[in-house]
Image (spheres, rainbow, N blue to C red):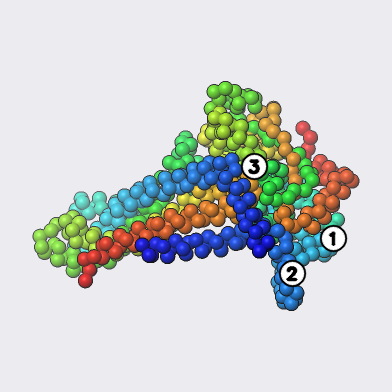
């Protein structure tokens, strides 16, 4: 009983030292959380935009390879597809931490807005993964669906929009949710370019107070709660999209 | 709704488990030693494998594990694949005095605290400065060296003295290495006072790189590494006046009193007989 009491008192004093004193929760945890969410949200938006474009280019190129007429349009598509391929290879072939360092010190050397650099780096990185997820979804829809659309008089874009993409989206939702969760946690490497995200905020408290575990566990719990919220959101969306299934 | 409640309770349970871990890391010594005697016999080999735990921290022939971050010349750095420097030599001298074998474990600066508090390392030695906040969580030895925080600026910078940083209306971006005293002081003196912003980099070299690309106006960092950076990068210079002085000490987990007392006694002897001074002189050449 006494042991428990001292243990609780110990936890309490650690908590006060790490979070309450000097307003540390506000200066490091809350501010860091703000930066983490800012980077994650905008990076997801950039990632989706890039992902959709790249996925459409790549799957259109692959799907129409046999039937296409050799012409100017095809040549353009070939070039764009090549660019997309290079983009995927480079982004997926290098660690995100190296990428963000390159953006920060070389490409955007004149900018010292680390959060913005983070958004761009994570957005471009995530775009590559989202593109492959979307492409997998589009390719997973049976060719017969596509032919049915065309025989009903839809052109390529209409078939895509009304028949293929809605089904594909439903199929990729779990993988997409996965990617967003990974992205959220990946923002913790932004600390390398002087951005104070949630992880760095926690580490700063460690350095100030020399208390190793309380700040890190606090940060871990915050990440956990956000991820649980994301999971719940995706679950709900998935359920809603499955309403029309028998 | 039920599902959310379930998930939430799960999260809370997890939180409690984690908190328990945290408690163990820095709970008073009593808990660790409370194991029943028959248990002790079984776990004997395990305790040996862990190195020196609470069992017999200063037993001759044991291992003294020092956690450090070997990116801080001349206090600790790599030479021919081995960690050398002032801290490494002083630690070796302490281990010799105690009849123990020194083992140096190189890790991230922030990880040193975790290693010491969890018992993975016996002591942390990485040019660590004693502050009020830190004393609440760890114990420190006698100070063995004095560090100076210097300011690096590009040549021709408008910052010509320390006072320029604190002049009224000053709004400079200051680069620091996270968790160093430069970071702590600059946060209080500059960021909190509304006299500029502080950018915290993980490594001193990153802060200097940022200075070279103009992302920050100056870098506050320890005098010794500052000299090394200025020597390696053209167009940078160190201001004549120092920003602050500080005392370096060895840190221990609070419950590890027996070891910290023994190490501290050995350190004081080494300071008294001039060993520490001769090690300092060997690495730091007077200007």
Measured as percent of width and height from the top left, residue A105 is found at 50, 41
In the visual, does B63 lie left or right of A217? right
Question: Which residue is found at the position 79% from the left and 46% from the top?
Answer: B142
Q: Chain of mark 1?
A: B
Q: Quadrant of the N terminus of chain A?
A: bottom right
Q: CA gap, disc 1 to disc 2?
A: 17 Å
* Label number found at residue B99: 1
In the visual, does A226 lie left or right of B177? left
Question: Which residue is found at the position 56% from the left and 63% from the top?
Answer: B17
Mark 3 nearby-residue class (10 Å; few <14, some 14–19, many ≥20): many
Q: Chain of mark 3?
A: B
Q: Quadrant of residue B4?
A: bottom left
Please tell me whether mark 1 or mark 2 is closer to you in this view. Answer: 2
Q: CA gap, disc 3 to disc 2?
A: 34 Å
Measured as percent of width and height from the top left, residue B263 is found at 81, 53
Q: Quadrant of the C terminus of chain A?
A: bottom left
* Label number found at residue B175: none
Measured as percent of width and height from the top left, residue A211 is found at 63, 51
Q: Nearer the viewer, residue B234 or B267?
A: B267
First in residue order: circle 3 vs circle 1? 1
Find disc 3 in the rendering and name its residue: B180
Say whether mark 2 and mark 1 are on the same chain. yes
Q: Is residue A143 above or below residue B165?
A: below
Q: Secondary structure at mark 3?
A: loop
The reply to whether residue B245 is visible in this rendering is: yes
Q: Quadrant of residue B104?
A: bottom right
In the visual, does B177 lie left or right of A55? right
Q: Secondary structure at mark 2?
A: helix
Residues at circles 3 and 1 in contact by the CB criterion of under 8 Å: no
Mark 2 nearby-residue class (10 Å; few <14, some 14–19, many ≥20): few
Furthest residue in direction right, as rendered = B273
* Label number found at residue B48: 2
């Amino acid at each position: 009983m006494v042991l428990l009491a001292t243990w609780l008192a110990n936890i309490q004093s650690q908590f006060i030292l790490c979070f309450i004193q000097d307003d540390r929760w506000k200066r490091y945890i809350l501010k860091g959380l703000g930066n983490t969410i800012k980077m994650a949200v905008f990076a997801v938006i950039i990632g989706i935009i890039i992902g959709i474009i790249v996925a459409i280019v790549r799957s259109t190129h692959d799907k129409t390879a046999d039937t296409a007429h050799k012409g100017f349009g095809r040549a353009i598509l070939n070039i764009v597809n090549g660019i997309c391929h290079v983009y995927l290879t480079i982004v997926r072939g290098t660690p995100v931490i190296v990428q963000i360092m390159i953006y920060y010190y070389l490409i955007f050397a004149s900018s010292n807005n680390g959060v913005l650099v983070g958004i761009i780096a994570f957005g471009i990185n995530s775009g590559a993964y989202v593109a492959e997820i979307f492409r997998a979804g589009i390719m997973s829809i049976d060719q017969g669906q596509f032919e049915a659309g065309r025989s009903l008089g839809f052109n390529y874009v209409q078939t895509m929009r009304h028949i293929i993409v809605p089904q594909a989206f439903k199929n990729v939702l779990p993988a997409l949710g996965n990617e967003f969760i990974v992205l959220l946690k990946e923002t913790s490497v932004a600390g390398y370019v002087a951005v104070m995200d949630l992880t760095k905020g926690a580490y700063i408290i460690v350095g100030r107070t020399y208390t190793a575990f309380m700040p890190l566990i606090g940060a871990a719990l915050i990440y956990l709660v956000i991820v649980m919220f994301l999971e719940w959101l995706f679950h709900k969306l998935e359920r809603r999209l499955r309403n029309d299934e028998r | 709704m039920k599902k959310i409640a379930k998930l939430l309770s799960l999260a809370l349970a997890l939180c409690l488990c984690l908190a328990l871990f945290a408690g163990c890391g820095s709970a008073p010594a009593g808990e660790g030693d409370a194991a029943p005697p028959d248990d002790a016999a079984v776990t004997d080999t395990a305790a040996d494998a862990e190195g020196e735990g609470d069992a017999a921290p200063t037993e001759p022939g044991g291992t003294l594990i020092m956690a450090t971050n070997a990116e801080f010349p001349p206090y600790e750095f790599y030479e021919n694949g081995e960690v050398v420097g002032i801290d490494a030599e002083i630690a070796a001298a302490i281990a010799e005095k105690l009849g123990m074998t020194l083992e140096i474990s190189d890790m991230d600066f922030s990880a040193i605290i975790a290693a010491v508090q969890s018992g993975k390392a016996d002591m942390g030695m990485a040019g660590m400065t004693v502050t009020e906040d830190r004393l609440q969580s760890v114990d420190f030895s006698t100070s063995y060296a004095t560090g100076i925080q210097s300011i690096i600026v590009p040549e021709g910078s408008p910052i010509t003295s320390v006072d320029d940083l604190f002049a009224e209306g000053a709004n400079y971006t200051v680069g620091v290495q996270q968790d160093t005293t430069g970071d702590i002081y600059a946060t209080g003196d500059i960021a909190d006072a509304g006299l500029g912003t502080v950018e915290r980099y993980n490594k001193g070299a990153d802060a200097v790189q940022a200075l070279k690309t103009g992302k920050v106006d100056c870098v506050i960092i320890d005098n010794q590494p500052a000299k090394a950076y200025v020597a390696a990068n053209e167009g940078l210079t160190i201001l004549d006046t120092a920003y602050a002085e500080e005392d370096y000490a060895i840190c221990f987990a609070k419950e590890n009193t027996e070891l910290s007392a023994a190490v501290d006694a050995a350190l004081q002897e080494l300071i008294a007989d001039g060993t520490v001074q001769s090690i300092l002189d060997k690495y730091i050449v007077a200007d």
